[in-house]
Image (spheres, rainbow, N blue to C red):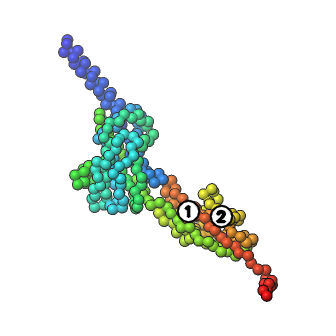
Amino acid sequence: MKSKIFLLRIFLLMAVLNIAFAATAQSGNLSIVNENGTYKVTFTPTSSGAFTLGASSLVALKAPLGTMALPTTVTDVSGGPWTLTSPKQSDANFDYWGYTTSGNTALTLTSGTSITLFTFPAPLPCNGTVSIVDPANLPAGGSGIVNGFDFGTTINSPVSGNIASVTGAGAVCANPLTAQTPPLQTKTAGAPATGNAATELAPTGGVGAYTYLQDISSSCIAPSGATALQTPVTVNSSTGAYSYNTPSNPGTYYYCIKVCDAGTPQSCVTKTYTISVPSVCNAGSVAPSVH
């Protein structure tokens, strides 16, 4: 009888452990985004409940060979502290970095709601895309071990190891969008005027193709003593070509053109154009003589 009770207790204990195992099981998706120059590594769970982020969880990042350098320290948000345990290693195509959390962290997760694991500033200069090493496609023939260091991305708990999948194409790293300030322009009163912002502003950096438009917001800074141009400036958004009618009255005027990149979110730079409209003598008038 005692042996039966003992076996029953063992059975109940195993049942409890199985429930605990199921309660801590968690899967989800890892992704990385570049938000205004800050990389955010996020985890989006596919189920809700309590979850202990295990100390052996590792997020491995990669970038095209020789394009940038990722930091040795990052800003902890969830889990952590996150530490660069696998410093930069390289194969024929990519550089790799591995960040591991060193403590077990109790989290309450909601299915479909992302949590940020850690962040770091976008490295400058840079040219390429930072992405998370997919646990379904590890380097070194699937082992994830490059030159003795582990780059096998995994999100797990101390009770149940669960490898997360990776979504998204990665985060594009780009140098800041900059543009030149156009020089003072002299225009004939009342005459049509044309130009090209792509040539005059010569933007560099940012992500993807540039677009152009007139900026009438508070970002348009008025030069001292200048009057805002009252006629609209028509701007071709893709080529940067623009046109407007020059005021008929002499004076100093200004308007602004904004150039934006194709990033998500966009980066934009606004530049002020200053135009001088000199006085013109009327036809047939005679300049006064000096004696």
Q: Position of residue 197 (x, y in %)?
A: 57, 68
In space, the residues marked 2 and 1 are separated at their CA atoms by: 23 Å
Determine whether, in the image, residue 38 is placed left or right of residue 165.
Answer: right
Q: Secondary structure at mark 1?
A: strand
Quarter of the figure with the N terminus? top left
Residue plotted at (34% across, 44% down): 82
Q: Secondary structure at mark 2?
A: loop
The image quadrant that residue 115 belongs to is: top left
Front-lying residue, 8 or 105: 105
Residue plotted at (56% across, 71% down): 200
> Which numbered marker is on residue 259?
1
Q: Position of residue 49 (x, y in %)?
A: 40, 32
Determine whether, in the image, residue 75 is placed left or right of residue 93.
Answer: right
Determine whether, in the image, residue 265 is placed left or right of residue 6.
Answer: right
Determine whether, in the image, residue 165 is placed left or right of residue 36.
Answer: left
Which residue is tagged 2? Answer: 224
Looking at the image, residue 223 lies above or below residue 54: below
